[in-house]
Amino acid sequence: MKYSRFLHSPKYAFTLVEIMFTVFIIGILLSVAVPNFIQARRQAVRKSCISNLHKIDWAKDAYIMDNHLYLDAEPTPAQLYPDNGTGYLRSVPTCNSGGVYTINPGNQFPVCSNGATEQHIIGGD
Ligand SMILES: [Zn+2]
């Protein structure tokens, strides 16, 4: 009971200025940290998408070489990553920001539908 009296004693309470100063400092720290977290997340999503585009490009090139096709051949998603996991990619690559991939012919890079707005393009970093 002695400890409880110590905590509730007005002599040891925080003043309004101390509390406001603490909230002000926390606010400054959050105003610096939150935009950086958002930026880091956006960059991680972008790099993940670019990595997927490189994988699709590699799988497309491998498919064209294995089947002795011309470079302007455009493999279908079912040829690159069939449902049973036996294709050139084991799983269907998905963009973390909801973009949709277009494979394109072998002489063009694959693209993400968010490429123009979110910089999800090969060579964009
Ligand atoms: Zn994307």
Image (cartoon, rainbow, N blue to C red):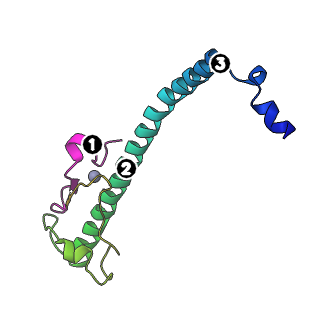
Label 1 lies in ligand 1 vicinity (Cβ under 8 Å): yes
Image side of residue 38 versus residue 115, left or right: right
The amino acid on which the numbered mark 3 sits, given as a three-letter code, is: Glu
Q: Residue at x 72, y 24 (%)?
A: 13
Q: Is residue 9 above or below residue 51?
A: above
Q: Which residue is mark 1?
A: 118
Q: Which residues are magenta?
A: 103-125
The answer for how far apart the CA atoms under marks 3 and 1 are is 43 Å
| Most foreground residue, 38 or 3 | 3
Which mark is on residue 45?
2
The residue most toward the top is 17
Label 3 lies in ligand 1 vicinity (Cβ under 8 Å): no
Q: Could you say which quadrant of the image residue 77 lies in?
A: bottom left
Q: Earlier in the sequence, mark 3 or mark 2?
A: 3
Helix, strand or loop for disc 1? helix
Give the position of the N terminus as an image quadrant: top right
Which mark is on residue 18?
3
The answer for how far apart the CA atoms under marks 3 and 2 are is 40 Å
| Most foreground residue, 93 or 76 | 93
Image side of residue 10 versus residue 24, left or right: right
Q: Earlier in the sequence, mark 3 or mark 1?
A: 3
Label 2 lies in ligand 1 vicinity (Cβ under 8 Å): yes
Q: Are marks 1 and 2 in contact (CB under 8 Å)?
A: yes
Helix, strand or loop for disc 3? helix
Q: Is residue 21 magenta?
A: no
